[in-house]
Amino acid sequence: MIKKLALGAIVLASSLFASGEVNVYSHRHYDSDKLLFKTFEEKTGIKVNVVTAKAEELVSKLAIEGANTPADILITADIGNLYEAKDRKLLQTVESKTLEENIPSHLRDDKKEWFGLTKRARVFVYNPAKVNPADLSDYLSLTDAKFKGKVITRSSTNAYNKSLLASIIANHGETKALEFTKGLVANFSYDPKGSDRDQIRAVAAGDADIAIVNTYYLGVMLNGKDQKDIDIANSVKIFFPAQKTTGTHINISGAGVTLHAKNKENAVKLIEFLSSSEAQAIFAEGNHEYPVNPKVKASGTVVAWGTFKEDNIALNEIGKNTKKAVEIATEGNWK
Amino acid sequence: MEINKFKYYLAPIIGLSIALPILSLIIYFLIEGSFNFNFLKSNALIEYTKNTSLLIFGTFTLVLILGTITSYLSARFEYLGAKFFAITFVLPLAYPAYILGYTYVGFFEYRGILSDIVGNTGVRFDILNMYGAIFIFAIAMFPYVYILARVSFGSISSTVCELVSLQQINPIKAFFRVYLPLSYPAIFAGSILAMMETLSDYGTVLYFGIETFSVGIFKSWFGYGDLAQAINVAMILLVFVFGILWTESLIRKKYRFVSSTHSRKKSPKIKLKGKYNLLAFVISFIISTFTLFVPTGVLIYWFILDINTLDFNTFDYLFNTLTLNIISSIIIIILSFIMIYMLRFYPSKIGNITHKLSILGYSIPGAVIGVGLLILSSFIDKSLGFILFSGTFFMVIFAYATRYFASSIGSIENGFSKIDTSIDDATKIFGKSEANNIFKVYLPLMKPYIISGFLILYIDIAKELPATLILRPFNFDTLAIRIYELASNEMLYKVGFPSLVLILTTAIAVMLLNSRFVRRKI
């Protein structure tokens, strides 16, 4: 402990004088990220200090700490919280040719305050024994009376559902979004509970026919050591919604440099590294997310699901509508 | 004289400091926002109140039933496997509620472990609901009642027992007529601990889809980025807590007579024979199966699935957990000792009030305490112009003190209450220095209570997650944090190994707590 305390003091002292490190607040708790930070340290000699917590907590923490914050980088697992940080003036602009080359323009902020690192597609998982994929179309179609009692998803408090609803507001307007929420709730098999993995299981078990989930959960199940998980993941199928209209809703994991970063140069270096082909491949293989860097291929599992049309709406529009989405979810009684 | 005056202030200062993170939230709330009275009329509040009431009432009832049965069996009877069950009844205390939640989902879910055991994929049981949550909290917390009530049942005087046998009342009747009323205070004290802990939980209730006050706090905070509204909900939670504490103090007053029927002359345990022996065994076995064997079995099963891919960094997390916990527990137990000692010898009204304030944290979600502390430390750091507290271990330890002060001073108070005031008088007559009295008289007398307070703190802190998550310094992950990360990645089987390591450490603490050395004088 004393060693740790001393270490803490050294870390603190060196953060004031030296530039050999970068401090990261991250919501991403995947082992792929641990590996990436280690690789970056080995390549550059810059020490990466990480603290993980929920994105909402990290944004609150940044706001409360103000100029005293030790954090140089904020990494979230969704656009909503990244936008919230930008909106609360907790991030700063970053000029980087590398980032502009590695990340397509619709996956980074037009004001250069945040940059997408991975893409996550919010899709339908369905039971092929009960659902004819020809009956499926876009998100709004889930409110159709023929799906009564057959649809499930997590709580509306979940960041991915908030972003999905925000994208529906941005694409179709508030009235449609409320209709969607009410229709969806009316078609729920039961009130939302559990994780994405639990939703997939429920479809496999026949408790529901269609679930709205992120693809990588299925990827993780398929590549785990639990044979039952593998069987379950194999027994369901993925449907990419809204192919004839807006395209499938895409969320991002992303990063921004904090307004009061003390190691801005290193912070930019780290984000640049994370967008590089080498790092993007680790993201893709480690957690089965879609890489943002077009030069990098998704993992074998993910490639097998096929290509699809993505919703390329400006992510800031989704961010802007996130609070509205919470209001609409509450009004529509989506728990 | 000046120093003596200062001593009157010491307890209030400690009590107030411990409550500071909560108080700073209240101050922040008063400055930044105002109470939203519309919220009082909203459907959400009705929902939170309904769910919270149901959850804590259900947990209270089940904890009461499980705790009373186990403690009565263990304290009064000798039966097949009694010694073994005396240990298995206390061990669930080593399990954090969220781990029990995961293991039971893994056991009962579609194609879960149960369906494998019976060889039928149709066999499953949905526990992600109110009943499931009550079940999980009850099995996680009934040992509180077991530990307290076992002492109480065990120390019922032999006169009472002789009376029972003279009247030839059968054991079950005797239980309801005689022993249960005599042990009410201990049973209630344990149940109230269980209720307070249930109120503070966030992760488990969210996973189970139950909207309680703590879920409401996080919905406002995370959903709208609205800390003031979140504190609004937290205020109502505090009212709830006060209600429970007030009820508890009323009950405690009502049953104060009880102590006189407990005497030094303890009655011997009754040896059960025949069908009663079998019945006691079966009941104990069923209870331990659900509260201990199933969760442990699931974790071991997951550990085996993971055996070729084990993450040996787990031992680094173990080292972090152990060092942080031991240091925190020592600091908090010392503060508790000073506080209660000062209240005994230098009592004051304000001291008693701050004493009440200092135990509030036990029912407040750790993340809320974490934010209170962030606000406080940020204010101090900004005023100083440099970083003194933010991102240091001091913050984490402070949060633990606020969160778990109640459980450590409980033990210390219990110890002091057993020291007769004649000893206080005697030490005064001898006229030795106060330091001498503390180190030569009170500390030795208090040893078992200090150790048990330390162990309880250790167990609570090892299981703590949300405050550690927000406040810990860079690059410092504990076992609880690692388990949370893996569970968030939704790779349940990976949770097995770190959970087993965590539970092994808390189980050792539980066994020590249960050992003769610590228990002898309690």
Image: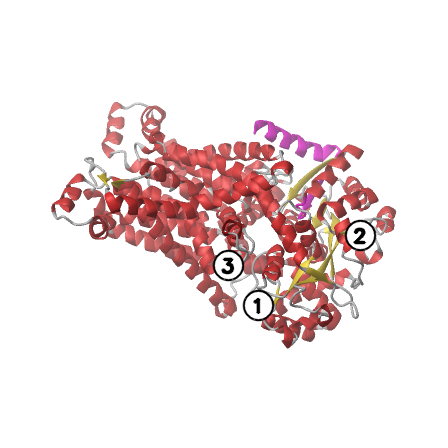
Along the line of sight, the residue nearer the viewer: A147 or A163:
A147
Q: Specify the amino acid type for callout 2.
A: Val
- Report, in whole angstroms, how far the alpha carbon at label 2 lies from the one at label 3: 38 Å
* Both labels 3 and 1 in a single chain: no
Q: Which mark is residue A292?
A: 2
Viewport quadrant of the C terminus of chain B: top left
Is residue B72 visible in this depiction of the protein?
no
B380 vs A64, nearest the viewer: A64
Chain ID, mark 1: A
Magenta span contains residue B25: no
Q: Are marks 2 and 1 on the same chain?
A: yes
Nearest the viewer among B108 and B128 is: B108
* A296 to the left or right of A226: right
Write down the region rendered in magenta.
A1-30
User: Label 2: few (<14), some or many (≥20) within 10 Å?
Assistant: many
Q: Which secondary structure, mark 3? A: loop
Residue at image position (87%, 50%) is: A101
Q: Is residue B78 visible?
A: yes
Residues under labels 2 and 1: Cα distance? Answer: 35 Å
Query: How many marks on residues?
Result: 3
Disc ID at residue A189: 1
The label number, if any, that marks residue B446 in the structure image:
none
Q: Secondary structure at mark 2?
A: loop
